[in-house]
Amino acid sequence: QVQLVESGGRLVQAGGSLRLSCAASGFTFSAYSMGWFRQAPGKEREFVAAISWNGGMTDYADSVGGRSTISRDNAKNTVYLQMDSLKPEDTGVYYCAARRLLDIRRWANDYHYWGQGTQVTVSS
């Protein structure tokens, strides 16, 4: 069955860095675009970053642009999100998602599979 398993979330101080990973299985990973979303307490889930099937296209939310890098390793069926210069407002549960088509999108409803999420907490 399809699985997306996020890891790497933790408590980190403001200004620090972390790398999130999402391991995929049960589908042809290289045929899917991938995205990262996050949800803070009391807020709606929001787009963070997306990457096309071959890594040739990426997109970032303005809130993380310049501080984050999304990448993927199709040989390992894994997508990554490197986040630097973390801020308290980056706190939330981070989800990875897979989109069956090859283009990249910012809207959660355009993604077909979701992981369970990993908690990121940034202390001030």
Image (cartoon, rainbow, N blue to C red):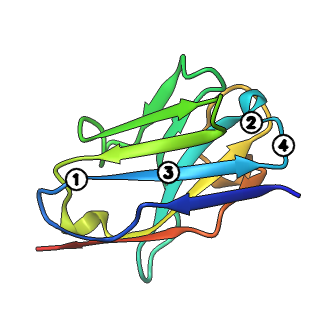
What residue is rendered at 62% in x and 20% in y?
54
User: Is residue 53 rendered to the left or right of residue 95?
Assistant: right
Q: Amino acid at mark 2?
A: Phe
| Percent position of residue 17, x then y | 22, 53
Q: CA distance from mark 2 to mark 1?
A: 26 Å
Q: Which residue is mark 3?
A: 21
| Percent position of residue 113, x then y | 76, 54
Q: Which residue is mark 1?
A: 17
Q: Are marks 1 and 4 in contact (CB under 8 Å)?
A: no
Q: Is residue 41 above or below residue 50?
A: below
The N terminus - image quarter? bottom right
Q: CA distance from mark 4 to mark 2?
A: 6 Å
Q: Residues within 10 Å of mark 4 (few under 14, many from 20)?
A: some
Extreme right residue here? 1
Q: Which residue is mark 4?
A: 27
Q: Secondary structure at mark 1?
A: loop
First reached walking from the N terminus: tag 2 or tag 1? 1
Q: Is residue 38 above or below residue 75?
A: below
Q: Amino acid at mark 4?
A: Phe
Q: Are marks 4 and 2 in contact (CB under 8 Å)?
A: yes
